[in-house]
Amino acid sequence: MTSNSESQGEWYTTDCGRTQFTLPVRYQNLVHIGYGASGTVIRATDTETGKYVAIKKIFHPFRSQMHAKQTYQRLKQLMYLNHPDAQVVQLYNVFTPEKNIDDFQTLYFVLNYVDYDLSRVIKRNVPFTEDQIKYIIYSLLRGLKFIHSAGIFHHELNPSDIGMDKNTNIAFFERGLMHRTLDPEIRSHIQCRWGRAPETALCERYNGDKIDIWSTGCIMAELILLRPIFRGTDLLDQFDKIFDIIGTPDLAILNDIFIPITKTLTSGVSPEGTSREINHFHLFKVLTGIDFLDCLLTFDHRTRPTAEEALSHPFLKTFHDTMYEPTKEFLFDEHQAKVYSTAEWKSIIWQMIEEFVPPSWINDEDDIADD
């Protein structure tokens, strides 16, 4: 069984960021960007389009059955969510230099290049205007509406997982994306505590789109404060920080959400709860801004808005237009719930690479590299 690696043209091998890369010669002028849990990323110039691209080399994609399945899930979701205007990083190419499946151990994703991540912009400590905050949060919710419609959630939404270009356009990086039916043992290892939705902190079985809405509220507050709003040192302190800002829900809600495991957490909570205190931030000159943040940071996920509902809030009326907010059919994945061996996952991924067709919009004349 041979691959279509010949269609990538000639190859070359070089080192970048202390990692060896074997790439088609079309990708030149390599610059190391950084490391992640699943791979290392470089910037390159695609000499066929003149654009910068980001190339991610996946670390040990087939180290185990779990790693192989995670690799499949990342590739499947990137392929399915490919869209020129949906706030999700775009997959331009996927390849392996290995010419047959028996030698298949290396995998590369070629993605659209994004100038910065949002955390880097926040660390500049330059206040955002209200209009900038509106646009960023609108864009986040627009992207969430798109991925949620496909049954995919981010679950790890924080400023470092959001790319931003020089025109303030944003895109979710692929790390963190996961399907509604993702294995609990994989899901339980995600999320930074400071942006973690309350329902996931004590009940890892919960899996839903409202997690991303809470995280969006945390990001909105961070854009205002230029620091995380809830900076707990441990789980209990995290809840103390949340309750200090938004007040405590009544005891019945806490027991409903967290079942009996919240005995320690709820020991000092009154049955009636306490009123929200988010208004004391004076975050916005207009009441709609305070009300909007209040909605996003609704403690009870059952009454927290969906992305689509949040987009219709008066605070975002300047940007909101359902005609220009794309959605996607629910992703039905025949392999998602299956149990395969590493070799079987590898075979499925090999076939996906063989069948991949680069999106037509990669040749659009924008974002030309300035090398």
Image (cartoon, rainbow, N blue to C red):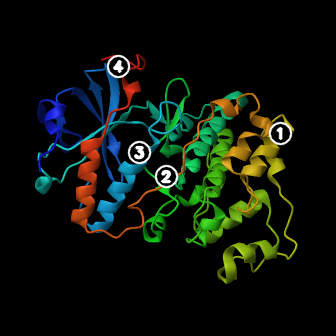
**Residue at point 65%, 38% (across, down):** 137
Could you say where residue 273 lies in the image, as x and y percent from the top left?
Answer: 84, 69
In-front residue for pair 44/76:
76
Identify the mark nearer the N-term, 2 or 4: 2
Q: CA distance from mark 1 to mark 3?
A: 35 Å
From the image, state whether disc 3 or disc 4 is nearer to you: 3
The amino acid on which the numbered mark 2 sits, given as a three-letter code, is: Leu
**Dot 3: few (<14), some (14–19), or many (≥20) neighbours within 10 Å?**
many
Could you say where residue 71 lies in the image, as x and y percent from the top left?
Answer: 33, 55
The amino acid on which the numbered mark 3 sits, given as a three-letter code, is: Leu
Q: CA distance from mark 2 to mark 4?
A: 34 Å
The residue beneath circle 1 is 288
Q: CA distance from mark 3 to mark 4?
A: 24 Å
- Quadrant holding the C terminus: top left
Identify the mark nearer the N-term, 1 or 4: 1
Res. 324 image quadrant: top right
Res. 127 image quadrant: top right
Identify the mark nearer the N-term, 1 or 3: 3
Could you say where residue 258 lies in the image, as x and y percent from the top left?
Answer: 67, 75
Q: CA distance from mark 3 to mark 2?
A: 12 Å
Mark 3 element type: helix
Q: Is residue 128 visible?
A: no
**Residue at point 44%, 30% (across, down):** 115
Query: CB of mark 1 within 8 Å of CB of mark 2?
Result: no
The residue beneath circle 4 is 369
Mark 4 element type: loop
The residue beneath circle 3 is 78
The amino acid on which the numbered mark 1 sits, given as a three-letter code, is: Thr
Query: CB of mark 1 within 8 Å of CB of mark 3?
Result: no
In the picture provided, is 370 more to the left or to the right than 5? right
The residue beneath circle 2 is 331
**As drawn, 213 above or below 284:** below
